């Protein structure tokens, strides 16, 4: 498999008046093309920070982040769908293209066909308020895919949804990602979600986040997330990761 | 079709609304007639308290003399200029503050001081500096409304959803793009609210200004009326003022509905 992103000894410290907080300590990761990687860890451990640093929204304290090519494009999808309520569904999807001055006729048509493929053809010219939670998430994903990113970063993408919708939407999003053949890093606190979707799970420790364990997920009859939950290995991974997380109330 | 239960619910809602509206109208009529009756039976002094009929007569008089719309127009005109200027200047300063955190931090205490200072106190100085003309009326109104505009717009700007800014940054948007494509449209409702607030603020400023210096406008009517002890004129002025402020308020609400379609 082709390596497309390499993180070496990543460190991140936050500075406040009251002192400094070590958020990430010596995290090293290699991401191969086409992989679906999930990062799980206790809440507040700095999982999301890793994504922000890859995306260059936050600065790292030290370490190396190496992309395979110069013009490496990153698509970032946040927990809250962050659709702009004053733009139509189509304009929301075109936002990234517009910002990067790549709004051509072909690109626009491509987005329209994506929206149509994923069941949003009736809502192209509607405002986001008319959409259900699942549809909003789908629009957010298409907006992220619009720039044709080399890697997708999903930051707790489903945690704003209720449980049933969450299962359905994760299934949905997974299918779209596989169909568009995207390399993905997903941050989540939901162990079951991680096992059902990922090829590889990285378990982080409490703050400062270090890598505690890495699991290659091998499920028998691997298909879509909802089906994967029925695999016989599921419970094994679940109990392993639960132990790693070492959660005490 | 709706179920019986839903029909009863709708009827109940409708009846409730009619009840509220009619009570409001009745209160108004009661107030006016009570006022008229008290004057009629000489319980209150007509010379000091005027009366609804006298107000109407005064309005007709003003109209026949050809001054009525002149006064109304000049007050509306001054108010419109003041609040337009206040929105433009206020937004400009709020933008500079959003753009440069340093400037914002530096001028914040000064804004607080200016905001708590009763601007009316500056009236006499304004007249000396700017002159006893329409300019000092607009300056007065501007002083009263611009600080509150800056504070409101700036607060809107810095409270824009952090996640949406993150999203823009993930698209590698420049600061200018974040401003035009996110900050401005996200705060449209703030502008509308500021506009509503500014109407009353600007009107207060204009009236104070007119009381101090002018030869025209509703404020002048009120001032002149009190000077010649013509209370009919004073109360007519107040009556016209309340109509103007309500009309301007509804005009903004109308635009709000047109402008913010996505809500």
Image: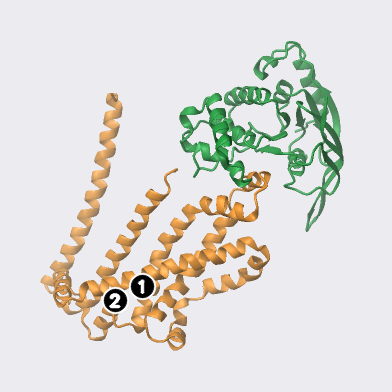
Disc 1 target residue: B78
Furthest residue toward bottom? B128
Q: Quadrant of residue A160?
A: top right
Of the pair B59 and A186, the residue shown nearer to us: A186
Vertical side of B58 occupied by A119: above or below: above
Disc 2 target residue: B217
How far, Cα to Cα, is label 1 from label 2?
9 Å
Which chain is home to disc 2? Answer: B
Q: Quadrant of residue A244?
A: top right
Q: Quadrant of residue A185?
A: top right
Can you give x and y, in whole percent of width and height, for residue B230 in the image? 20, 81
Q: Secondary structure at mark 2?
A: loop
Among the chains pictured, the one given orange colouring is: B
Q: Residue at x 27, y 30 (%)?
A: B8
Of the pair B140 and B49, the residue shown nearer to us: B140
Q: On the rendered image, what quadrant is the N terminus of chain A found in?
A: top right
Q: Tags 1 and 2 in contact by the CB under 8 Å rule?
A: yes
Can you give x and y, in whole percent of width and height, for residue B176 in the image? 61, 56
Q: Nearer the viewer, mark 1 or mark 2?
A: 1
Q: Residue at x 48, y 76 (%)?
A: B118
Q: Is residue B43 visible?
A: no
């Amino acid at each position: 498999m082709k390596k497309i992103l390499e993180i070496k000894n990543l460190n991140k410290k936050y500075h406040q008046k009251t002192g400094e907080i070590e958020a990430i300590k010596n995290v090293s990761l290699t991401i191969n093309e086409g992989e679906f990687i999930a990062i799980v860890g206790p809440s507040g451990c700095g999982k999301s920070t890793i994504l922000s640093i890859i995306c260059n929204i936050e600065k790292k304290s030290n370490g190396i982040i190496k992309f395979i090519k110069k013009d490496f494009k990153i698509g970032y999808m946040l927990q809250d769908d962050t659709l702009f309520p004053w733009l139509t569904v189509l304009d929301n999807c075109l936002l990234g293209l517009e910002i990067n001055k790549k709004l051509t006729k072909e690109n626009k048509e491509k987005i329209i066909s994506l929206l149509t493929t994923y069941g949003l053809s009736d809502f192209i010219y509607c405002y986001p308020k008319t959409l259900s939670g699942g549809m909003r998430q789908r629009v957010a994903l298409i907006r992220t895919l619009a720039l044709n990113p080399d890697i997708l970063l999903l930051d707790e993408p489903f945690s704003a949804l209720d449980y049933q919708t969450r299962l359905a939407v994760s299934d949905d999003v997974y299918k779209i990602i596989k169909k568009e053949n995207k390399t993905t890093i997903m941050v989540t606190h939901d162990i079951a979600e991680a096992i059902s979707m990922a090829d590889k799970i990285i378990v982080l420790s409490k703050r400062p986040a270090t890598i505690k364990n890495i699991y290659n997920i091998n499920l028998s009859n691997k298909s879509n997330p909802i089906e994967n939950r029925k695999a016989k290995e599921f419970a094994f991974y679940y109990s392993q990761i639960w132990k790693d997380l070492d959660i005490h109330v | 079709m709706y179920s019986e239960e839903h029909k009863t619910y709708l009827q109940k809602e409708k009846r409730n609304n009619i009840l509220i509206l009619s009570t409001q109208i009745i209160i108004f009529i009661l107030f006016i007639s009570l006022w008229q009756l008290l004057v009629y039976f000489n319980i209150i002094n007509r010379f000091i308290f005027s009366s609804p009929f006298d107000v109407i007569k005064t309005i007709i008089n003003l109209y026949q003399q050809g001054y009525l719309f002149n006064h109304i127009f000049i007050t509306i005109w001054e108010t419109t200029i003041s609040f337009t200027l206040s929105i433009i200047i206020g937004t400009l300063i709020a933008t500079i503050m959003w753009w440069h955190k340093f400037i914002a931090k530096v001028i914040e205490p000064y804004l607080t001081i200016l905001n708590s200072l009763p601007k009316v106190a500056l009236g006499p100085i304004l007249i000396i500096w700017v002159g006893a003309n329409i300019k000092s009326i607009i300056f007065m109104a501007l002083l009263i409304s611009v600080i509150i505009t800056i504070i409101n717009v700036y607060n809107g700007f810095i409270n824009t959803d952090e996640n949406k800014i993150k999203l823009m940054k993930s698209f590698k948007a420049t600061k200018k793009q974040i401003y035009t494509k996110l900050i401005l449209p996200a705060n449209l409702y703030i502008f509308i609210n500021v506009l509503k607030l500014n109407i009353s603020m600007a009107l207060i400023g204009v009236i104070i200004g007119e009381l101090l210096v002018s030869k025209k406008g509703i404020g002048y009517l009120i001032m002149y009326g009190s000077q010649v002890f013509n209370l009919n004129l004073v109360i007519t002025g107040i009556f016209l003022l309340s109509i103007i402020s309500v009309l301007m308020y509804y005009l903004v609400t109308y635009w709000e509905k047109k402008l913010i379609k996505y809500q």
